Image (spheres, rainbow, N blue to C red):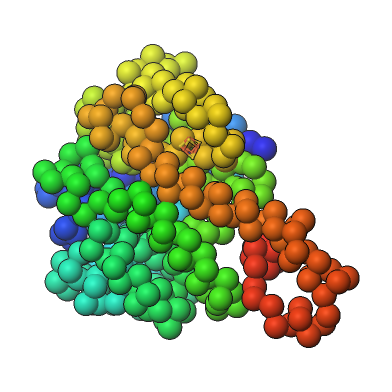
Amino acid sequence: MKSPFHVMLIPTLGCPGNCAYCWSSEEDSPVMSMEIIKEVAAWIRDFDDRQVTVTFHGGEPLLAGAEFYREAFPLLSEELAHLKPAFAIQTNLWRMTPEIAQIFAEYQVPIGSSIDGPKEINDVQRGDGYFDKTMHGYQIARENGLNVRFICTFTSYSVEFREEIFNYFMQNGLTLKLHPALPSLRGDDPEKWALAPEKYGDLLIYLLDKYLENLNTAEIMNINDLFKSVFTRTGTVCTFNDCMGNTFAVGPDGSIYPCYRFVGMPEWVMGNVRDHPTKADLAESRAWKLMHAFKDFVDENCKDCKHIHYCRGGCPYNAITPTGGEVKAVDPHCPAYNQIFDELNDRLNKELFGTDAMAMGMGGSRRRQRNRKAGIMDLMQKIVSE
Ligand code: SF4
Ligand code: SF4
């Protein structure tokens, strides 16, 4: 199976928000020009022959304004028609307007946004007023038929409210995608909000159980992705699937980076779209070499781990953050990944080959089948039928 090809465009590093744990806002950041968008199209056109997903990320990408998207979508769609581009955006929705929403609807752009739970929990982490502004934008997006999914960042603070947060998403019919707060290469106090790996592992198991209890009504994207990875023995999201060479990010000035998380850090620039670099050109950069050094490190370090094929050492950015940019370890969430992968494998095997299989198969009465709790195979059916 070919890995997906993904280009993240960062129209600006500016953001009107002030989330306590965020590392990416930079006030007064310039906005990407249409000339750079044209160069992006010219660069990607012959760079790779896979279908491409173009995600607008930030900073806050809606700061670029309606005119930017009114020009960028048709330009990229036409220039990259042979690559069947799919678009997406990650935004806090504060600057959503009916005008922008209509442009996004025309190009069927799915929206990823961020809410950390009910207002009183969210605004502690993301700042006073965040919740109301995001919900206002969400309303406009919904009125224009846009599909919005929320990422919920769990921090060392909010993990203590996991039940309230899960219930909030359930009661409001929102899809949950969780994100553990991470230390950053650039924060002043990088560890303050970070979610410890063991807490993250426990959280994943807790959410797996809650998901199975509420399988008809809940939607937890990470659990779906983790299960798909275990079942297919291949990582289905970038964290678990050697992102190097498959994902790139372009900053406002056209600089190319390995991922949006490196944008704005000069030492991670691989090239510039204006030069239309090939993969061989980018491979000369220090950033490319470091990303591939991580891949080699995982091949050696994780070679005895039974999850290596669908974990791949986790996210390289997470891995190099604690060492100031050097490749010396895997993703610090390794214990959490191990825990949830073990759990999913155990439950899968038990249901396929253990006593549960008997109960579900010929040995189980209809009544017993009706009364049993949902399990991993039910989750698989749900994923397959979507
Ligand atoms: S560095 Fe991490 S977040 Fe970025 S593409 Fe790679 S795995 Fe994904
Ligand atoms: S779970 Fe840990 S040891 Fe296993 S592949 Fe992932 S990072 Fe490596």
Relative to 221, is 273 on the left or the right?
left
Q: Position of residue 369 (x, y in %)?
A: 76, 78
**Residue closest to the eye, 337 or 56:** 337
**Residue pushed farthest front?**
355
> Above or below — where is 136 with respect to 313?
below
Quadrant containing the N terminus in the rendered view: top right
Quadrant containing the C terminus in the rendered view: bottom right
Relative to 370, is 240 on the left or the right?
left
Tell me if I can see residue 109 in this picture: no
Residue in the image at 42% along x and 54% along y:
201
Q: How many marks?
A: 0
Q: Position of residue 135 (x, y in %)?
A: 30, 76
> Above or below — where is 213 with respect to 319?
below
Relative to 155, is 80 on the left or the right?
right
Determine which quarter of the picture holds residue 153: bottom left
Tell me if I can see residue 193 in this picture: yes
Q: Position of residue 163 (x, y in %)?
A: 37, 75
Residue in the image at 35% along x and 49% along y:
197
**Residue pushed farthest right?**
362
**Residue closest to the eye, 349 or 210:** 349
Q: Position of residue 64 (x, y in %)?
A: 26, 53
Determine which quarter of the picture holds residue 41: top left
Residue in the image at 79% along x and 70% along y:
360
Residue in the image at 13% along x and 46% along y:
189
**Residue closest to the eye, 346 or 244:** 346
